[in-house]
Image (cartoon, rainbow, N blue to C red):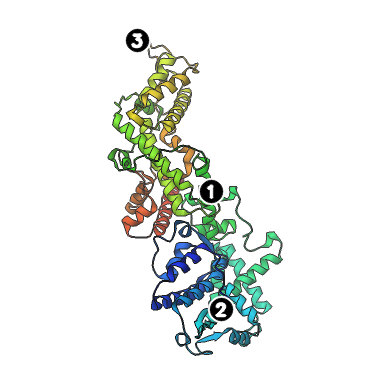
Amino acid sequence: MPALSAIRTGVIEALAAELRFAGKATLVRHLERIEGLAPGIEVDGVYPAEFLVFRVTGYRAQELGSGELDEMVPGAAVLGDLSALAERISESAKITEADVGVAGEDHWTIDGLAERWGVSRKTVERYRRKGLVARRVDRGSGHRAVVFMRDAVEWFERRHAERLGNAAGFSRMSDAMRAKIVRDAERYVARLGWNRSRVCERIAQRIGRSMESVRLVLVQHDEQVPKGERIFRMVGVADDAEQMEMLRESLRGKRSGTIGARFGRSAMSVSRGVNRARRGLILDSGFGVSAVDLDSTADDGILLEEVVRSGLETRGARDLAGLIEQMREQHAAVVYEQSARAQAVGVLRGRVERLCTELHPSTPSGRVLDEIETAMRWMMLLRIELAGTQLGLMLSTIEERIGGPIDTLAPGRVAEVLSEAISVVHGVIERFDGAGNRRLAAPVGLAMARWCAHLDDVAVPVTEGKAGRRLITGFVVKDWTRSMWARWWWLRPEVLGDGALEGASDSDRVLLMRRYGLGGERPWTLGELGEEMGTPGMHVGRMVQGALRRVGGVKNRDEGSN
């Protein structure tokens, strides 16, 4: 009796353990789903664990162990473990010969397939690692037999027609057919930018062959020609620079398939590259690598406070005169608001730190990345509000140092001084925790005094009856709130600049405002948006990409007409 195939992937092993207690009727349905799943798995694909759970069980698992559900499983590993899973489920269901029908009509044994294909028993057993799903049948007295259902066998024959070329009823692919496949693939890539999976699917449909047969032809072609003549340049893992460029393209709303066509990679490879780039940027921001002693007793309830969730709408003037006017407006800082927002930043930082420990180095979970980045967006919106309360103190400290109004200096120098001062205040806010209802003004005033000590500028005296100030209206400056985003640039896509949403549809505007916290309220995760809209978070992610793409298109057309 053939030994049980070993299971090598975590999600399949967890499924086998979870499903063994189900009733026989349920287990038989699982077997049928497993046999139906194999034809849809591509060897060079990568599949989320949650997708595999759903396809086998018919329901969306919420809890199968946090590590397994975040796993991304290569297609070859999935095919290699499907038979092992089916065999274990068969054992749990106590499948008998009566359950599988008549041999030779409804199923084949190992010997039957070996004869049908003209191969050895060992070869048939090895094919279980290629996606040939088997069931184990109880023949009584402790004897078990491995059988293969008709649908599973016929699918395997179609996919591996070349491998099984000597068997009756199979025809080998002619050289002319191989050349046609190569020509068609080159045309699809050159004209349409399709990736290999899509090319294989289209050609297989047109010539009546399996996708695997077409894929093997294209793989063999690319292995035999010089690197520069390959149809698909899918060699090795993308390096850091390539992953970063993929991320930049994604932030413009471009589809993974479109990006993949540019780099000669599959859409799944692009998604992995983008996620690796996001993980690297998060860690480079100081999260997940430092031994910061986070307060585990911090109250997450602070995130429910209204001053933390709304009123996050401070924007910087784009004109130097307007910026100075904004800074001269003295707003009395509300200590409770400052303290609550600072404490919320601390809670969010702790959340990010904890989530960073869940990020796999090579296949970071998109869901975890989304939760981290949404928390970081929220942190930045809160920090901007905190900085906005210190503009008056910042300006008064500078003017005290230079001995007069700052707008008597040259406009370029004014813009430079204010930009550096805002950076100083931002650094203070990053360290301010709001504990004990302390006022932010104290550490900001001290830091500004130290920084101003190095200023050599001297204001022009304002004499009665003479205009000592210079007119600087119309001198364009960068929005200081955008400059605070510079360190976390990828969290606020470039296409969402000033006026970007003016030409957007109502649905796109609402979606992007909620997603990125553009309307004065805290940002939303894809999961939260999906729950609100009654659709999976993955679908919402595609909707956001489409909205970014459309907003970018509107913006580009506007710029082109100016």
Q: Can you tell which of label 2 and label 1 is closer to the viewer?
A: 2
| Residue 477 occupies quadrant | top left
Q: Residue at x 50, y 40 (%)?
A: 285
Q: Tell which circle, 2 or 3, labels the residue nearer the N-terminal end.
A: 2
Horizontal side, residue 283 vs residue 324: left or right: right
Confirm whether residue 365 shows in the render: yes
Residue 505 is labelled as none
Q: Are marks 3 and 1 in contact (CB under 8 Å)?
A: no
Q: Residue at x 42, y 58 (%)?
A: 538
Q: Tell which circle, 2 or 1, labels the residue nearer the N-terminal end.
A: 2
- Disc 3 to disc 1, how far (Cα)? 60 Å
Q: Number of marks in the image? A: 3
Q: Residue at x 42, y 21 (%)?
A: 446
Q: Which quadrant holds the N terminus?
A: bottom right
Q: Which residue is mark 3?
A: 465
Q: Nearer the viewer, residue 387 or 122?
A: 122
Residue 155 image point, x, y percent: 53, 79
Horizontal side, residue 108 vs residue 65: left or right: right
Residue at the extreme front of the image, as rendered: 141
Q: Which residue is mark 1?
A: 277
Q: Label 1's element?
A: helix
Q: Label 2's element?
A: helix
Q: Tell which circle, 3 or 1, labels the residue nearer the N-terminal end.
A: 1
Residue 174 image point, x, y percent: 67, 79
Q: Can you tell which of label 3 and label 1 is closer to the viewer?
A: 1
Q: Amino acid at mark 3?
A: Gly
Q: Label 3's element?
A: loop
- Disc 2 to disc 1, how far (Cα)? 38 Å
Residue 156 is labelled as 2
Asked if residue 126 is positioned above or below residue 341 in the image, the reply reads below
